[in-house]
Amino acid sequence: MSREITRQIASTPSAVSARVAPLLGVASTYLFTLSDTQLGIVLSVFCGFFLYIGASDLLPESHHRHPKVLTGAMNILRATVIWLAIHFASL
């Protein structure tokens, strides 16, 4: 009985599209190229999205669940490490 359910789940449209999507993504890289400038802009936009998600959702949630001094100190430490990495990368 469980194998039949597993087969039904594995053949649903969402499971099939989850298998096909990475292959289409890899294949699409052969259809276009980006210059160094364009790649920098695209990476900057995606980095901005990740920073926004972290600042607007994950950071407040960590303070909500663990409102301790250590949580605040670790956030300041993380920001400092990121700043140092950026600073030394530009040297």
Image (cartoon, rainbow, N blue to C red):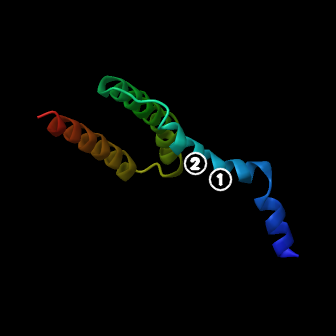
Please tell me how crowded label 2 is: few (under 14), some (14-19), or many (20+) other residues with Cα within 10 Å: few
Q: Residue at x 28, y 46 (%)?
A: 77
Q: Indicate which label's residue lies in the foreground, 2 or 1.
A: 2
Residue 9 x, y percent position in the rendering: 80, 60
Q: Is residue 21 above or below residue 86?
A: below
Circles 2 and 1, Cβ within 8 Å, touching? The answer is: yes
Q: Residue at x 62, y 45 (%)?
A: 21
Residue 10 x, y percent position in the rendering: 76, 60
Please state if 43 lies on the left or on the right of 19 as rendered. Answer: left
Label 1, secondary structure: give it.
Answer: helix
Please tell me how crowded label 1 is: few (under 14), some (14-19), or many (20+) other residues with Cα within 10 Å: few
Which residue type carries mark 1?
Arg
Which residue type carries mark 2?
Leu
Camera-side residue of 52 and 33: 33
What's the distance in space between the residues labelled 2 and 1, CA to CA? 7 Å
Camera-side residue of 88 and 72: 88
Location of the C terminus (image quadrant): top left
Q: Residue at x 39, y 49 (%)?
A: 71
Please state if 27 lies on the left or on the right of 42 as rendered. Answer: right
Residue 24 x, y percent position in the rendering: 59, 43
User: Disc number at residue 19?
Assistant: 1
Residue farthest along the front direction in this orientation: 30
Location of the N terminus (image quadrant): bottom right
Please state if 61 lies on the left or on the right of 42 as rendered. Answer: right
Camera-side residue of 53 and 56: 53
Label 2, secondary structure: give it.
Answer: helix
Residue farthest along the left direction in this orientation: 91
Q: Is residue 13 above or below residue 40?
A: below
Residue farthest along the right direction in this orientation: 1
Residue receiving disc 2:
23
Q: Residue at x 41, y 28 (%)?
A: 42
